[in-house]
Image (tube, rainbow, N blue to C red):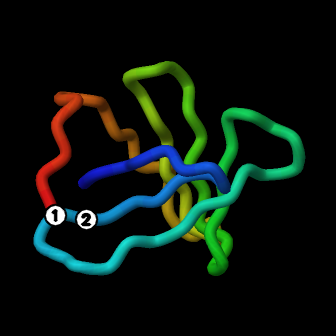
């Protein structure tokens, strides 16, 4: 998975896919970002992120930064 910072927020892409998903900053909260479906990324630190579904039907997934390199 790759997450890149943009002027509008973030964009994320899973490995093996070609589509980027746009996330915008949520209500003046600098650590929360949301996509059009309501899925959220919450940054707990520079190296740890929680991903939550818009439906809230699954526990948060925890992502850890392993590299600064982005492989498309």
Q: In the displayed structure, does residue 4 sit left or right of residue 71?
A: right
Using a 10 Å C-alpha cutoff, classify the residue at mark 2 as few (fewer than 14 neighbours), some (14 to 19) or many (20 or more): few
Q: Residue at x 19, y 29 (%)?
A: 66
Q: Are marks 1 and 2 in contact (CB under 8 Å)?
A: yes
Give the residue number, with chain letter if any, for mark 1: 15
| Quadrant in which residue 1 is drawn | bottom left
Residue 23's place in the image compared with 20, above or below, is: above
Q: In the displayed structure, does residue 29 sit left or right of residue 10?
A: right
Q: In the displayed structure, does residue 49 sit left or right of residue 65?
A: right
- Give how far across and how far down residue 19 sits, in percent: 32, 79
Q: Residue at x 16, y 64 (%)?
A: 15
SS at mark 2 in the image: loop
Using the image as rendered, state which of residue 64 and residue 59 is in the foreground: 64
Give the residue number, with chain letter if any, for mark 2: 14
Using the image as rendered, state which of residue 37 and residue 72 is in the foreground: 72
Using the image as rendered, state which of residue 23 and residue 38 is in the foreground: 23
SS at mark 1 in the image: loop
Residue 58 numbered mark, or none: none
Mark-to-mark CA distance, 1 and 2: 4 Å
């Amino acid at each position: 998975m790759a997450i890149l910072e943009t002027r509008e927020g973030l964009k994320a892409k899973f490995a093996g896919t070609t589509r980027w998903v746009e996330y915008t900053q949520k209500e003046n909260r600098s650590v929360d970002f949301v996509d059009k479906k309501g899925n959220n990324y919450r940054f707990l630190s520079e190296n740890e992120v929680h991903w939550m579904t818009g439906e809230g039907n699954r526990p948060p997934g925890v992502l850890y930064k392993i590299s600064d390199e982005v492989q498309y």
